[in-house]
Amino acid sequence: MRPDGAALHTRVTAALEAPVRGEIRDFAQALADLYDARAVLFYGSNLRSGSLDGVLDFYVLTGGPREKGLWPRVAYHEREHAGETLRAKVAVMRLSTFRHAAEGRHADTTIWARFVQPCTLAWQSDAQAGTEVTAAVEAACMTAARFASALGDPQGTERDYWQALFRATYRAELRVEKPGREQQILEFGAGHFDGLLPAAWQAAGIAFDKAGRRLQPHLLPQEREALVQRWERRRRLGKPLNVVRLLRAGTTFEGGARYLAWKVERHSGVVVPLTPFRERHPLLMSPVLLADYWRARRRRAATQDSD
């Protein structure tokens, strides 16, 4: 922790220690056992709502040196609880890689842009793992705050800077989001973001003035230009990186066929049967699943017409 990072450290520690439902911790424990993890982070809309419905989002952080090549690996898992099926989308990567990406030392933007948002430590192997995760999330906040200082106007409210940052990251990533999505993030996490930017600037060594709700970071012209250039490199690489990851996920998404089948049933009510072959080959299974879906839908429509 930096000497001037006490405020950020306190905020991040409190957020990571926030209580979650026992079902979430049990699921995190099961994932940790499966992947021999050092820590498991829980985040996303279910963290905000406290609901178990839909798909839970976990990052499973493992030991070892940084990966070579693309990360994270993605998997879909189901777990039975009290007669109900809990579902989770799980990303798996090395904790050392997570820290490297959170520090902004990689062209990828997804880690620090995601984990400056609310998350909690659902499971840890020991205190040292918790310390390392805390340091990584603090680094994500500082990285996001640095880019926000350059991507926002020379002065503005804290919300203005976060909105500028999230608009930029959504444009850089291959994600289809409705206009105003960045405002929803800030509204859902109002308590989380209130005061986070000044704390992160202080920890990152960025001086600033504050007059009421308005902030003005002290960036020399060359400092701002350097940050903008760093951002432009990430913006140019953002979509190509996401395309490569999607292509890779099409062949390596563990449980992807079950995930697709569940999504179809959830949104249409049509049950698409799975076979062992389809389980093993989710990419090949996609057009077959679509054909099965249309056949099942036509059969259901014909049955309803005959009633």
Image (cartoon, rainbow, N blue to C red):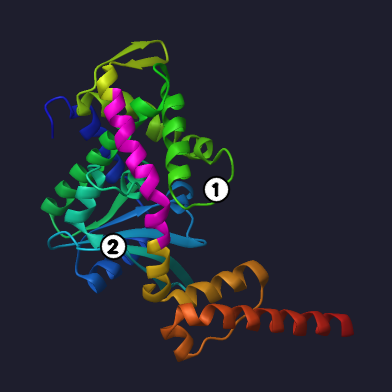
* Among the 4 quarters of the image, the one containing residue 2: top left
- Outermost residue on the right side: it is 306
- Nearest to the observer: residue 40 or residue 74: 74
Q: Is residue 145 visible?
A: no
Identify which residue is drawn at 45% across, 90% down: 276
Which three-letter amino acid code belongs to the residue tagged 1? Glu
- Magenta stretch contains residue 228: yes
Location of the N terminus (image quadrant): top left
Q: Cβ–Cβ below 8 Å for labels 2 and 1?
A: no
Mark 2 vs mark 1, foreground winner is 2
* Among the 4 quarters of the image, the one containing residue 10: top left
Identify which residue is drawn at 40% across, 16% down: 155
Identify which residue is drawn at 26% across, 17% down: 220
User: Badge 1: few (under 14), some or many (20 or more) residues near its Cα, within 10 Å?
Assistant: few
Task: Residue 221: give x, y in percent of width and height.
Answer: 29, 18
Disc 2/disc 1 C-alpha distance (Å): 24 Å
**Which of the numbered marks, if any, corresponds to residue 163?**
none
Which three-letter amino acid code belongs to the residue tagged 2? Leu
**Which of the numbered marks, if any, corresponds to residue 177?**
1
Q: Give the range drawn in magenta.
A: 224-243
Q: Does residue 76 appear to the left or right of 63 in the view shown?
A: right
Q: Does residue 40 appear to the left or right of 63 in the view shown?
A: right
* Residue to which mark 2 is pinned: 70
Image: 279 above or below 254: below
Which of the two discs, 2 and 1, labels the residue nearer the N terminus? 2
Task: Residue 35: give x, y in percent of width and height.
Answer: 24, 71
